Amino acid sequence: MADLVWTPVIEVARMIATKEVSPVEVVRAHLDRIARLDGTLHAFITVCGDAALEAARAAESAIAAGRTLGPLHAVPIGLKDLVDTRGVRTTGGSRILADRVPDADATVTARLTGAGAIVLGKLNMHEFAYGPEGLNDHYGQTRNPWDAAVARVPGGSSSGSGVAVAAGLVPAALGSDTGGSIRIPASLCGITGLKPTYGRVSRAGVLPLSWSMDHVGPMARSAADCAVLLGAMAGYDPADPTTSVLPVPDYTAALGRDVKGLRVGVLRGMFAEGLAPGLGAAMESAVRQLQSLGAVVDEVTLPRAGDVAAAALAVVAPEALAYHERWMRTRPQDYQRDVRERLFTGAFVSGVSYLRAQQIRALVRAEVDEALARRDVLLAPSTPIAATPLGERETVVDGGRADVRGALLRFTRPFNFSGHPSCSVPCGFTAEGMPLGMQIVGRPFDEVTVLRVADAWQRATDWHTRRPQI
Amino acid sequence: MGTPTLAYLRAVADAHGLPWSDAELAAAAPAVGRTLEMLASLDVIELAESAEPTTHFRIV
């Protein structure tokens, strides 16, 4: 069943529950594909083949006995390798934690496996999640599956998650997002990735990059599949004091609905400048499509968004160094160079700069809230550029040169800073065949509306159904 | 603002207990220079005296 690896989460779960396919068949199909392709893609750091097959057999027995664990019963998933897994090493993509084996699951791991999911393995990432390209010197360089001829960045930091989902190695994965690390690889790999509201999903047992900016969320091939995963893992967690006590709605109730009358604000200003060729046209086409579906569209700017790059740096760099300082003192040579240098910059941020950045943060959040006071969602490109060749530090946009790293983060980071939910969905391709993504940003804790728009968009388009030729 | 001097980089590294070689510090100088430029840009952003910093992140 070659198509099994491309079957959506919701459909796999249904087929397993109705005994159309066995959990062992599903897990084997994915493990076979990993064995065939991951030597080139390097999406996985650790493959849990034996444990996954054992779990699949147990799931099969449970179904035979008339028991199922939940909505993800026997659905295979991958976890970014900073999400703790009891008894399975969790490296953060680093040499420093190469032998770290947690003795407990992260809350999200426990919730997803509690809902029936089977962990196929731990996914590659930019070392310690500190980079948007998805670079890793220690576990093999993850490669974007959309270009067989030129090795291109997958986007990061959840690079393995993006590539594994895009290449059919797993139907869904978890990522984390501090400046765009779910949405950037989703955009560059042509999949769907949801950064929930800050406080919606527990970070307990997830290695931190920047405590006040980190988010954990699902990555899959559709908004519908992201909705199922979010429902299984969202909600208050006493182990994470930043999680909200707000009840978790039924995110699948957002699916299959129309967008008639929904108010969509298209972000202009900074979000419409310096775009890759074809991206502006793809966005305009998306706007027309949403209008044709009944959405009421207007334009809006976020003037403070231009301040976010500097302010976010003043927050993330010292928070990251605070976590890493012990190893920066004793094992600096064990970091890959770009991460070591980035961590070092945290030493140059004064307390005054940190707090000034937090003042700006309050204003940015208020500005996004204000834009959403009279609109249901905001729309913007996820990244201004598509996947660039590995090793390329600058690229050309609008006739000028742009730093690849800065460009990748430019449109996603404002919503880490503000904490608003944002979902990246595929919206087209460049002339070179590289995926383009757009993000749908919603009100705090209104993932239902974000997913409703994303799902309606995907039922009206086929960008998310395209597959890389690998 | 330019590239920071090795002496400056050394002083900050020492203050944080980072035993880096001169070569490692010199390699980091461009990244530090860019950081300092970005931090300087924060100082020219107009903020009302009443602007409270974000000190909590849980919305509900």
Image: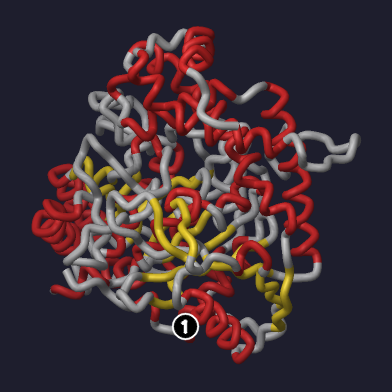
Q: Is residue A64 visible?
A: no
Q: Is residue A299 visible?
A: yes
Left or right, A238 with respect to A13, comes to right
Q: Position of residue A56 (x, y in %)?
A: 20, 53
- A338 to A96, vertically: above or below: below
Q: Position of residue A448 (x, y in %)?
A: 61, 65
Is A379 or B7 nearer to us in this picture? B7
- Quadrant into which the C terminus of chain A falls: bottom left
- Give, as a three-letter code, the residue at label 1: Arg
Is A366 or A232 nearer to us in this picture? A366
Residue visible at 45% across and 45% down in the picture: A176
Look at the image and name its color scheme: secondary structure
- A171 to A279, vertically: above or below: above
- Quadrant into which the N terminus of chain A falls: bottom left
Instruction: Please report, as a chain letter, where disc 1 is located.
Output: A
Q: Position of residue A252 (x, y in %)?
A: 52, 68
Residue visible at 35% across and 20% down in the picture: B24
Residue visible at 42% across and 27% down in the picture: B28
Is A87 or A380 nearer to us in this picture? A380
Q: Quadrant of residue A351?
A: top right
Left or right, A295 with respect to A257, comes to right
Q: Position of residue A32 (x, y in %)?
A: 10, 59
Residue visible at 46% across and 24% down in the picture: A344
Q: Quadrant of residue A466?
A: bottom left
Mark 1, other Cα within 10 Å: few <14 / some 14–19 / many ≥20: some
Left or right, A57 with respect to A289, comes to left
- In the picture of the structure, the residue carrying the numbered disc 1 is A459
- A54 to A457, vertically: above or below: above
